[in-house]
Amino acid sequence: MNLEDLGHDVTVSGPATRVVTSSGHNVAMSEAERFRVLHVTLAYGGGLRTALQRYIAATPHLEHHLLIAGVEEEFPPADVASVRLVGERGRRRAIVERVAELAPDVVHVHSSWAGFFARRGPLSAPVLYQPHGFAFEPGARSGPARAAFRAVERWAARHTDAFAVLTPHEGRLAHGLDASASVVPIENLTDLDVGLHGGWSPPARPRITMVGRVTGQKDPEFFARTIEAARAAGWDAEWTWVGAGDDEPTARLRDLGVDVTGWLDPAGVAEVLRATTVYFHTACYEGFAMSILDAAAVGTPVVARDIACLSDTDLSKVRTPEAAAHVLRGLIENADALTAEAGRSATFHAARRPEQLTQQLDTAYALTVARAR
C-alpha cells in the first residue's frame, strides 16, 4: 500500500518530506523546524504502547508529546518531550486544554476511545486519527453495538483531517466512513533485535503461543476451543498466552492448563517466541497485530485467524478452532512443513524496513497539515 494508491502525490528527499495534495497544498517538514506531535491515547499498553514507542524511535527529528491514560513510568522519558496523564473524567476537556497549551503541529490520535473524545468537536490543531482496528469490525461485539460504533466513527470523521491506516483493508473502511477522506498508510514494524540473541529453532516439546490482551478482541475463547479440538483429535502441546486481561477468560485458559504469563518486556516476549513451535494469533479483528510482526522477526512460524486485516498477506490462516487444530498438528508433525512456514515468516518480516516507517510517518504528518489548511 502506498500514497499513490490512495490518490496523493508524494516526494521524499533527505530529512524533509514534501507532500503535494490533489488540491495543490504544499507542505515541507525538516529537522530544523522540530515539528511537534501530540499523541493522544486512552488505551495505552500492550501492542499500542509498543507501536507508539516504535513510531517515536523512527522519527527522532520530531518533537513528541504524550497525553495518555496509563502509567507515566511505563514510558522511557528520554523518548518524549513530555507525558501528561488523563483521568477517568473530563477527558475531552483535558485534550482541548493540552492542545491549546502545547500548540502542536499535529494531534496524532490513537484508537477508538481517544478518537471519540478528541473528535467530539474541532481542535485548534490538525488531527491525524489512527484507529488501530475499527471497533465496528465483525468480532466480539453484537450487531447493534457495531452499528453504533460505525455511526459514531462516521460522525467524528468530519473533525478528522486525515486517517492513518495499518492495512489496505483499514483504508477501505476509512473511505467507507467518508469517501473524500485523506487516508495514509503507517505500517507497524517490529524492533526486536534478532541478531543479538539468535533466531527461532523448534523446541523439543511442541509449544503454541499467543500474545495479546486477554479480552474479547483477541478471542481467548477461540484459543481455548482450539486446545479442546486438539485434545479431542488425540494430540496436545504446551500452550502459552503472553499477556493479561479479563478475569473470566484468563481463568478459562488456566483451567485448560495454559501458561498465562502476564505482560513481559520485549526481551521476554522474544525469548518466549524463540522457544515456540508455532505462533497462533486468534484475534477476531485487528488493525495489524504487533505480535505477528514480532514472531515473524524471530522467524517463528505463524498461523493466524482468517480476518480481514490479513487478507493481503500470504500468512497461513484458519477460520475455525477445528481447522486450527488440524493445521497446527500438520506443522508440528512435519518438520519440512514447519521449516517452510518459518521461511514464510522470515520473508514477511524482511518486507518491512525501518526507513519505510520513518517516511510514512513524516508523510502522514505533512499530509494532515496540508489537509487542515
Image (tube, helix red, strand yellow):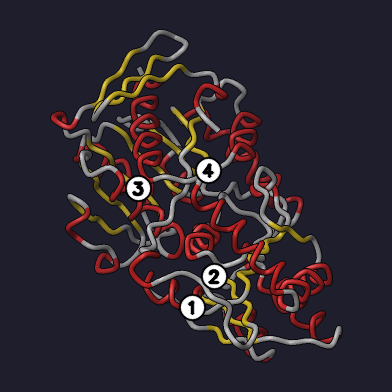
**What residue lies at 47% left-to-right and 44% top-to-bottom?**
115
20 sits to left or right of 8: left
Rendered view: 306 above or below 298:
above
How many neighbours does mark 4 have within 10 angstroms: few (below 14), some (14-19), or many (20 or more)? many
Q: Amino acid at mark 1?
A: Val
Secondary structure beneath dot 1 equals helix
Crowding near the residue tagged with mark 2, few <14, some 14–19, many ≥20 C-alpha atoms within 10 Å: many
Amino acid carrying mark 3 in the image: Tyr
Q: Secondary structure at mark 4?
A: loop
Identify the residue at image location x=13%, y=30%.
Answer: 32
- Foreground residue, 143 or 63? 63
| Residue corresponding to mark 2 | 211
Q: Amino acid at mark 4?
A: Leu
Instruction: Identify which residue, 183 or 144, lies in the foreground.
Output: 183
| Residue 11 image position (x, y, % from top left) | 37, 19
* Precedes in sequence: disc 2 or disc 4: 4
Numbered circle sitting on residue 166: 4
Q: Position of residue 205 (x, y in %)?
A: 63, 88
* Contact check, label 2 and label 1, Cβ < 8 Å: yes
**Residue 55: image tag:** 3
Point out the frontmost of discs 2 and 1: 1
Q: Nearer the viewer, mark 1 or mark 4?
A: 1
Disc 1 designates what residue?
272
What is the x, y in percent for residue 188? 47, 49
Q: Earlier in the sequence, mark 3 or mark 2?
A: 3
Separation of disc 4 and disc 3 at Cα? 13 Å
The CA distance from mark 3 to mark 2 is 20 Å
